[in-house]
Image: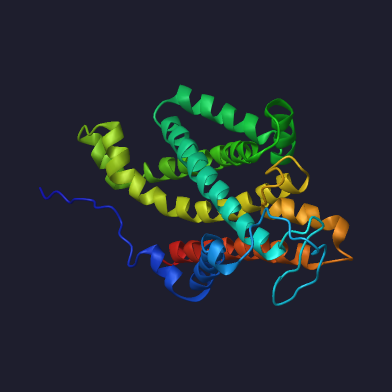
Amino acid sequence: MTVTQVAPPTTSSHPLTALRRGQGLAGVVLVGVIALAGVLAGVLSAYDPLAQIPGANLVGPSAEHWLGTDHLNRDVWSRVLAGIRVDLVIVLLAVPVGAAIGSLVGLAATVHPLADVTAQRVFDLILAFPSLIFAIALTAITGPGAHAVVIVIIAAEIPIFGRQIRTAVLAVREQPFVEASEVIGADTWWTLRRHVLPHVLEPLGVQFALSLSVAVFIEGAMSFIGIGVLPPQPSLGSLIGESIGNLDANPWMAVGPLVVVAGLTLGFLLIAQALGRARRVT
């Protein structure tokens, strides 16, 4: 009798190659340029984002102040650059933590029925509260600040990644190569690590890029209404909020951070779209 081995399916190309051309490349360049501007803030601006400049109240754009100054005589360009850095630190801290926790919970839910039921109820509880409502309730307890933004983003990502990895794992476990591994007595965790995880990481990459764009929006919304990053520390959301009462005097106070928020969101969405298209093609 001949025994035929069933091997895991392979893809013809790595999904990350999608980031080297078309929309993927455009997204990487867009996010990369904005991130680089934030990192090089000290080089690209001669002004301290917190320093007040005598006699420069609500000055319009000029060679000295590229985006003008705000109502407290601070250089808007330098504050936008500082806001980029603050936003990226928050987003790149909160999303990976939320993704890791959610993925671990979702993975555990596939091991035992009781764990599955418990995880589903936790996910339902988190999703029952819109992020902004949860943010307001949280800041009523802990007070506003960057820590509140991080916690809200983490909480928002846990059920998203948890449910996605649970669904993906359950689908892959029905494949013949996984069933064969279980028949020969392989350990459950070994099977998950060796055969299942490699096939669920790609959709998580798409979700990760999408979550980064959502996290930028969450930070902007929380800081805009005053429960996120607190003054005088600039963030993109707080800069937009500060500009509302001064649009007539210097509309560039709003244009700068709005363009950056739009650029980051669009960049992450282009990356996610390129990764998703690569998955469908392969």
Looking at the image, residue 65 sits to the left or right of residue 151; the answer is right
Image-quadrant location for residue 64: bottom right
Determine if residue 155 is in view: yes
Q: Residue at 52%, 56% (x, y): give it.
A: 209
Looking at the image, residue 188 sits to the left or right of residue 251; the answer is left
Q: Residue at 81%, 63% (x, y): give it.
A: 55
Residue 244 image offset from top left, x and y in percent:
84, 56
Residue 151 image offset from top left, x and y in percent:
60, 36
- Vertical comparison of 192 with 59: above or below: above
In-front residue for pair 20/8 = 20
Q: Residue at 39%, 29% (x, y): give it.
A: 111
Looking at the image, residue 233 sits to the left or right of residue 201; the answer is right
Residue 52 image offset from top left, x and y in percent:
73, 56
- Vertical comparison of 57 with 92: above or below: below
In-front residue for pair 257/67 = 67
Q: Residue at 60%, 42% (x, y): give it.
A: 153
Looking at the image, residue 137 sits to the left or right of residue 162; the answer is right
| The C terminus lies in quadrant | bottom left
Residue 114 image offset from top left, x and y in percent:
47, 22
Name the residue furthest right.
Answer: 248
